Structures are given as C-alpha cells and as structure tokens.
Image: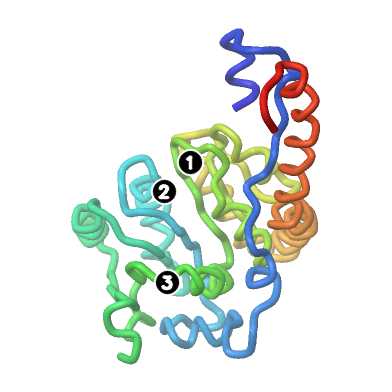
Amino acid sequence: MTRQYLAEGIGRPEQYITVRSGMEVEPLLNAPPGHDCAHTREQLGIAPTDFVIGTVARLAELKGHDDLLDALAPDLIKNSGWKLLWVGDGWWRGRLLDKARSMGLTVSELDLHASPSEPPTASASQIILTGLVPPERIPDMIRAMDVLAHPSYREGLPRTVPQALLCGVCPVAYDVDGTGEVCREMQTGRLVPPGDRTVLREAIQWCYEHPGERAAMAARGRDQCAAVFSSESMVTALEAVYAAALPSLRDLGLRT
C-alpha cells in the first residue's frame, strides 16, 4: 500500500510506517494433541499419502477457484492421490461445484459445521469441501494440506499465507499487492503471475515433485512469520508509532 500511495504522489516515504496485522501464532505453530495433520486427515477422509492442495477462502469471485479447476483438472483426474481441499463457503459454491462435476471431477461436501459427527466419505473424491469451519479449526485444516494455494486476484496482505507458513505449509500464491512480501519466490513459497494458470500448475507440480525443497521453504517462512506476525510484535510496533506521534501532537496544542 505504501508503494501504491507513493506512486500516486501521496506523502513522502518517511511518513509511512508498516505495522503487520498480528495474530495469535501459538495455535498455528504448535498443534495440540489430536489436532495434527494425521488426525485431521483421518477426520476428513484423506489418506496419509494423498497430495493435498488446499484453499482457505470464500467461494466467490476473484478468489481463484476457477483457476485451480482449469489448471489442475487433468492432474486431479490422472492422479487419484491428488486432492483439492476447499475450506470455506460462499455464493459461488453451486456454480463452482457444478463446473467441477462437468469437468469429470468428483466432489464431497462435508459441511463440518452442520454435521461434525458423521463419518467422512471423501476419500474417493477429488474435491473435498468443508463448508464453513470455526476459526479455531483453521490451523487444523491448513496442517492437513501439502500446499496452500492462494490464487486470489485482489488482496492487501492475505492472512492465509502467513498462517500457512506458521503451520509449516508451503504457499503457492498469485503475486498481487502485498502477497509477495511474505510468499517470496523460491524462498518461502512459489509466487505466480496473476491469472497465469500454466505457471500456477507448474508451481504446484514442482511442489509435488520436490517435497524436501517445499518443506525447507515452509520452515524458512515459519521462522520469519513467527516474529513478524505475532500479536505481541504488532502491539509493540503500534505503541512505538503512538509514542513517536505524541510530541507532534503536543506541538500542535492537541490534548494527549
């Protein structure tokens, strides 16, 4: 956002300060008993050996679900162990699932919020839709993934990308707005030109073929995000911003 504002002639570089949107990182960094990858996959009907490409996003315009279908449908049909795990819901749900089925893909709609006690039947499906899940279960869902795909066309800085890295999952994301500040190409993930479905497929295929390198990038990003995106870091940075602003306010004769 700083770059965009400066490009429009708004302000000077020294007038901008970036404070990352902090979050509680502990639930993402450390899975409590029964909430690790293996347990969550079992609950979702996903095999330990499956290659899971996940999203955490509204099923809505500009989130890139169409791009994933167009890019990966042949691979999903050819490789029975490849799965799309879609976490979320939205007004495009019916259209997207109709499109998936028209492409020859099978879909399981689990809707965990509605019937969490029912046994999963998703193991044979290529797309697994969880529906809405409580926020506290998002780390579980992410840990069940091998890759977090975020082909969104418009973002500030998507929280899903640092959340994935904090869970030790490699992101593959479109290079829009602030996404590249966290998902850095071949350092902490794979960064793809927006809308380039060929490169999107190639990046995901690369992650499948290079599990060691994928894990190393996720570990690198995990260490960096743990410091930058903690709620404590955000509060400390905000306090520093206000402390620096107080003298100027006093000079203007304003109450503090």
Kind of residue at badge 2: Ala
Mark 2 or 3, nearer chain start: 2
Place of residue 96 in the rendered image (x, y in percent of width and height, measured from the top left)? 25, 54
For disc 3, the marked residue is 134
Nearer the observer, 7 or 148: 7
Q: Residue at x 76, y 30 (%)?
A: 246
For disc 1, the marked residue is 198
Q: CA distance from mark 2 to mark 3?
A: 29 Å
Place of residue 172 in the rendered image (x, y in percent of width and height, measured from the top left)? 57, 50
Place of residue 145 in the rendered image (x, y in percent of width and height, measured from the top left)? 54, 69
- Determine the image quadrant of residue 24: bottom right
Q: Secondary structure at mark 3?
A: loop
Tell me whether circle 1 and circle 2 mark residues in contact (CB < 8 Å).
yes
Residue 105's place in the image compared with 12, above or below, is: below
Place of residue 230 in the rendered image (x, y in percent of width and height, measured from the top left)? 71, 57
Q: Mark 3: few, some, or many residues within 10 Å (few <14, many ≥20)?
A: few
Q: Residue at x 50, y 82 (%)?
A: 41
